[in-house]
Image (cartoon, rainbow, N blue to C red):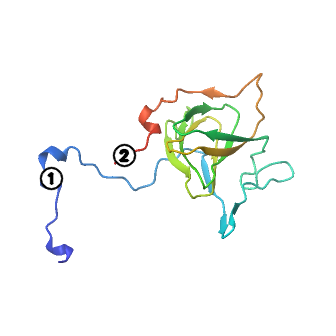
Amino acid sequence: MNDHALPRLSLDDIGVEYRELVTTQEYGPKPRIEGVQILDLRWFTDDGGAFTELARLDEQGCLAVLPEFQVRQVNYSVVLPGAVKAWHLHFNQEDVWFIPPTVRLLVGLLDVRASSPTYRNTMRFVMGAGKAQVLYIPRGVAHGVANIWAQDAYMMYLVNQQFDPEKPDENRLPWDVLGESFWQIQKG
């Protein structure tokens, strides 16, 4: 039987108790945030393991892929199952995150820069999960991660200023500013 022999359906052909529940998943481009960059890294695997080059620095400590970004500190973080670490906001600091391909974390970004063309845009995506990537987060973009899976996850991140406990550029927004569901597995 070919498809042309079957009658086409419309929403009117769906039972009345289900019509208002029908939605269509969107497959178009997701909203972006001005200045945010996701850069693919090369991930080499062989029968002995895997390798990726995280960063190349020039003589001044600037990243080859982001020449304006001078590395001033490198950090490592462990995120336990069920933990939400959000929202962080820096006025001067910028971050470059790496989440290893062998783990996964849900990443959330929120543009809170009033003069930005993407003000209030959000980005929500999984990093790690078999991909080798770095994420550049400009100052003024609130950011966070959630480990909504059952194993510990970890990340490394580079920042362009050293942490100063006397004048910390570590500002916060409430973790649920976009609603609790932002940090949950989306069902459906």
Q: Residue at x 44, y 32 (%)?
A: 180
For disc 1, the neighbor class at 10 Å (few under 14, some 14 to 19, many from 20) is: few
Q: Position of residue 74 (x, y in %)?
A: 75, 42
22 vs 119, left or right, is left
Front residue (pair 74, 9): 74
The CA distance from mark 1 to mark 2 is 22 Å
Q: Residue at x 19, y 77 (%)?
A: 2
Which amino acid is tagged 2? Lys
- SS of the residue under disc 2: loop
Q: Residue at x 67, y 28 (%)?
A: 170
Residue located farthest toward the bottom when viewing the structure as drawn = 1
Rendering quarter of residue 91: top right
Q: Which residue is mark 1?
A: 14
160 is higher (above) or lower (below) than 2: above
Work out whether residue 113 can be spotted: no
For disc 2, the neighbor class at 10 Å (few under 14, some 14 to 19, many from 20) is: few
Q: Position of residue 125 (x, y in %)?
A: 51, 48
Q: Position of residue 158 (x, y in %)?
A: 72, 44
84 vs 158, left or right, is left
111 vs 182, left or right, is right
Front residue (pair 35, 72): 72
47 is higher (above) or lower (below) than 187: below
Q: Which residue is mark 2?
A: 187
Q: Looking at the image, tell me whether mark 1 or mark 2 is earlier in sequence order.
A: 1
Q: Position of residue 10 (x, y in %)?
A: 17, 57
Residue located farthest toward the top when viewing the structure as drawn = 166
Which amino acid is tagged 1? Ile
- SS of the residue under disc 1: loop
Q: Residue at x 18, y 74 (%)?
A: 4
Work out whether residue 67 can be spotted: yes
Find residue 1 and name its label.
none
37 vs 19, left or right, is right
